[in-house]
Image (cartoon, rainbow, N blue to C red):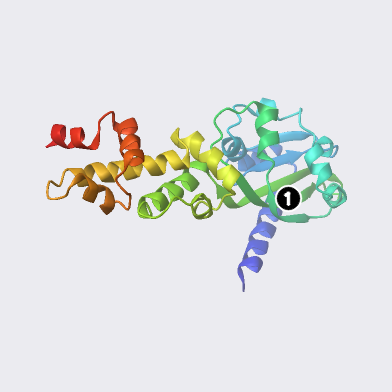
Amino acid sequence: MNNKDNMGDKQNSVMESFQSFFGKEELLAKVIEYFPYPIEVYAPDGTTVLVNKAMLEEYHVSSPDLIVGKYNVFKDPYVVSTGQFQVLKRAFQGETVFFPDVKVPLEDIVQRYGIQDLDVEAIYQDITVFPILDDQNRVQYVVALLINKRVYRGKEEIEKAKEYIENHWLDRFDLSAMAKAACLSKAHFTKLFKKHTGVTPHEYYINFKIHKIKEKLLDTNLTVAQAFNACNLDYNSHSARVFKDKTGLTPSDFRKISG
């Protein structure tokens, strides 16, 4: 049995379990509250009536009161724009529907709930939407079960880029290669790198190269020019000026003070 079949069996089991709790709303609410995956429950008109702890933690929403009774999935412009609106409505008519690999509209969520500290750049989810029926097969609630497939957190991606720079500092500066290492576009990478490090990728690259030059200058067996050459940098007026701008000292003065 493949992974897709396994996931389908698990989701069917979850749906059957939730359905078995129908009529025991208090128990159902507790099960949903402590379920390990984000869950949002809607009334038949599309209004949210319950979100669980995992949902709030996923998006750093401070209180369910920001969502419950205020959000309506049918009135969400992003949902309407996906072109899947009619498919979604089938869940409110008694069917189970599945949306694979959905990119979560994080910017909309951040603005809607005034979130300040969401350190996530992108989330892709598999979303299963299924009804909970009464004993006459009428839809009483609709449950959205959200399972993350891929999560891109800014810090993680930038750490990959920093590691790339520190492993390729002898090479020429290559923004495209750095962005590729972080699996981001160049524009997004540059913006994100500055956000998480306080410097641009080029500044980080230069700072790391200066750090290596300082290490070489401590080796008195090398001339200043040889120390720079060992770092794949010609020793000239420009490189000497960059060194002084970064350290406040000329290479020779640095060597004297550090010797």
Q: Nearer the viewer, residue 121 or 216?
A: 216
Residue 257 seen by the camera: yes
Residue 236 is left or right of residue 55, and the answer is left
Q: At numbered mark 1, what does the secondary structure look like: helix, strand or loop? A: helix
Residue 14 occupies quadrant: bottom right
Residue 41 occupies quadrant: top right
Q: Outermost residue, bottom direction?
A: 1
Q: Is residue 234 above or below residue 47?
A: below
**Which quadrant holds the C terminus?**
top left
Q: Residue at 29% x, 42% y: name it.
A: 211
Q: Is residue 253 above or below residue 184?
A: above
Total marks placed:
1
Q: Residue at 87% x, 47% y: name it.
A: 138
Q: Residue at 59% x, 49% y: name it.
A: 185
**Which quadrant holds the N terminus?**
bottom right
Q: Nearer the viewer, residue 105 or 96?
A: 105
Residue 22 is left or right of residue 200, and the answer is right
**Residue at numbered disc 1:** 19
Residue 26 is left or right of residue 236, and the answer is right
Q: Residue at 64% x, 62% y: name it.
A: 7
- Where residue 59 appears, x then y in whole percent? 60, 36
Q: Amino acid at mark 1?
A: Gln
- The 10 Å Cα crowd at callout 1, few under 14, some 14 to 19, many 20 or more, is some
Q: Nearer the viewer, residue 22 or 132?
A: 132
- Where residue 110 appears, x then y in whole percent? 65, 32
Residue 21 seen by the camera: no
Q: Nearer the viewer, residue 258 or 134?
A: 258
- Where residue 77 appears, x then y in whole percent? 81, 37
